[in-house]
Image (tube, rainbow, N blue to C red):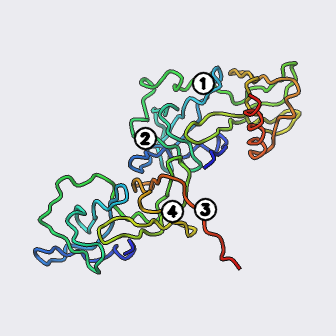
Amino acid sequence: MTAALMRGADLIGRPVVDASVGEDLAEVKDVMFDPARGALTGFTLRKRGFLGRKMKHVLPISSVTAVGTAAVMVAGAEAITHPDDAPAEAVPERKADVLSDQVITESGQLLGTVRDVIVLGGPQPRVVAFQVAGGPVGDGLVPLGAESAVSSSALIVPDGFEHRIRTDLTGLAAELALIEGGR
Amino acid sequence: MQLSNLLGQDAIALGTAERVGTVKGIGIEGSRIVSVQLSDTTISATAVRSFEGQVLTFDETVGNAGLSPVATGDPRGRLVLDTNGDGLGSIVDLVLTGDGDVETVVLTDDRTVPGPRLKVIGSFAAIVGGDLPPPSGPPAG
């Protein structure tokens, strides 16, 4: 089965399921992304249920066995760890938030601001694109290529990158395949 | 035998011929029933003489030592996930053999999962391995 593309916002509320016993341990509160490494680092969590109470514990990406369209899968309850015991990159930092980052071309043209991340699910989940809005190119999906630079304040893309921006996940999947093929 | 027929059956202890209660649920590990939840107690599936009768008869002398901690209950309606976290539907029923093996998991949209692909049925979801055939389409013609 082909891994699905999904918006970070769609992952919020998704159950974290222990595949060894079929029980739900928590649900996703937010997606953690490390701009410096361009990597998905894990998830912050909340308790399951209508009230969705906060949990201090986090889910490092190294403990995730797969991200699917219905659940985030882990191999056991020990996958969920206290931030003190989690890898440093899996501890949430406010300054690492990429939402509202400006998306700018190398020559300084503002294309918009980041509104969400796009995650490729499956057994090796990763952030592959950003959803941008509020700029001259309108709403769109910016694929993360090797030539992109991202920080906690801006995403820099090559000049002329506008033609790579796609409006839906199907178009993005085709664009990502082109980028992969060009590497 | 389907799970829907098993649930609600009277459970009779063979030694005393007493009705102990009715079947409320089952616990499944892999593709095998490991425990049976009755009205007021849970028994090991090894005590059950057969899952094919109209009444569940069991040997009360077997005891419950080493009873599996797997969740028991009525699994119908529970989500079915593959190991990649993709949803396949919900459990509509289970087809069981007389020995307590799950032969087939019947899902919504007329999909089925062969029992041996079942890894566990938990309190939240059933987990299955391997790819499944697509939903069956409308009849040809």
**Label 1 is placed on what type of residue?**
Arg
Q: Secondary structure at mark 2?
A: loop
Measuring from the top left, give residue A86's x and y in whole percent. Answer: 45, 26
* Disc 3 chain ID: B
Q: Which residue is mark 2?
A: A75
Q: How packed is label 2: few (under 14 Cα within 10 Å), some, or many (20 or more)?
A: some
Regarding residue B42, the answer to whether it shows in the image is no
Q: Are marks 2 and 1 in contact (CB under 8 Å)?
A: no
Helix, strand or loop at label 3? It is loop
The image quadrant that residue B134 belongs to is bottom right
Image quadrant occupied by the C terminus of chain A: top right
Instruction: Name the residue beneath numbered marker 1.
Output: A94
Instruction: Kindly report the distance in space between the C-alpha atoms of the residues bearing marks 1 and 4.
Output: 39 Å
Circles 2 and 3, Cβ within 8 Å, touching? The answer is no
From mark 4 to mark 2, how far is it between C-alphas? 22 Å
Residue linked to disc 4: B90
Disc 4 versus disc 2: nearer the observer:
2
Which-is-in-front pick, marks 3 and 1?
3
Q: Is residue B57 left or right of residue A150?
A: left
Q: Identity of the amino acid at label 2?
A: Ala
Q: Which mark is residue B134?
A: 3
Residues under labels 4 and 3: Cα distance?
15 Å
Disc 3 residue type (three-letter):
Pro
State the image quarter where residue A41 is shown: top right
* Foreground tag (1 vs 4): 4
